[in-house]
Image (cartoon, rainbow, N blue to C red):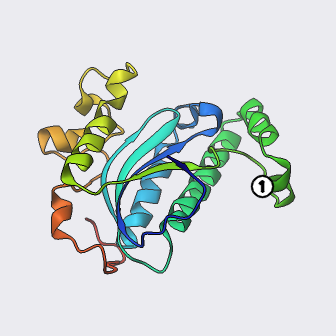
Amino acid sequence: MSVRKNIAEPNGVFFITLTCARWLPLFKITDGYAAVYKWFDYLKQQGHHVSGYVIMPSHVHALVAFSTTSKSINAIVGNGKRFMAYELVRLLESNGNHDILRQLAEWVNATDRMKNKKHEVFEPSFDKKECYSLRFMEQKANYIHMNPCKDGLAILPEDYVHSSARYYYTGLQGVYPVITYLELQDIDLSRSQALKGRDE
């Protein structure tokens, strides 16, 4: 479901999709995968947990367990999108991708332009599904990990670098360390567990 309305739940496990504007492959063009990992770092510092992810050329799928904090889940995701947008624009500028920057500028609607928004880097809304059961989490984790194979970017899920599949399939952490959805069972998401610098 594409959402603009607030997520009422203060915590929970969510399957989230963030899509680049008009499906442009901005992560690939900029080699901007680190922007997503920096956002994941921030989530962990705030006591949340990354349980699965894949960064595709034009979008990100993530399985995130949000603990209760002072910020709403919508605000957390919205702030993450803003941070990643700034990072991707910075990379486009430093790489001299002026045509793409002009395109992103043209896509900003009049209302946002009045608020001084300069580039439309992501689609305005994000997709989310709350994961109520282990079976649903497993289904979403499998979907995440098979995404590169379906798009012809990898033969085996664990071969795609920007994914948590390696940990799920081999037990070895990949580029970014995660915990599995099974490990989430031991975590109480109703209480903030933020520990600055803690590595999950």
In this view, which residue lies farthest toward the left? Answer: 171
Mark 1: amino acid: Lys
Residue 62 is situated, as x and y percent measured from the top left of the image, at: 38, 48
Element marked by disc 1: loop
State whether residue 49 appears in this view: yes
Query: Which residue lies at the image location 52% right of the left edge and 32% below the top edge?
Result: 28
Residue 60 is situated, as x and y percent measured from the top left of the image, at: 46, 42
- Give the tally of numbered discs: 1
Residue 140 is situated, as x and y percent measured from the top left of the image, at: 30, 43
- Horizontal side, residue 51 vs residue 79: left or right: left
- Horizontal side, residue 42 vs residue 161: left or right: right
Q: Nearer the viewer, residue 155 or 142?
A: 142
Classed neighbour count for the residue bearing mark 1: other residues with Cα under 10 Å, few (<14), some (14–19), many (≥20): few
Residue 190 is situated, as x and y percent measured from the top left of the image, at: 31, 77
- Horizontal side, residue 104 vs residue 191: left or right: right
Query: Which residue lies at the image location 26% right of the left edge and 54% below the top edge?
Result: 178
Query: Which residue lies at the image location 41% right of the left edge and 43% below the top edge?
Result: 61
In the rendered image, the vertical position of residue 41 relative to residue 17, given as above or below: below
Query: Which residue lies at the image location 79% right of the left edge and 42% below the top edge?
Result: 105
Residue at mark 1? 117
Quadrant in the picture for residue 106: top right
Which quadrant would the C terminus be assigned to in this image? bottom left
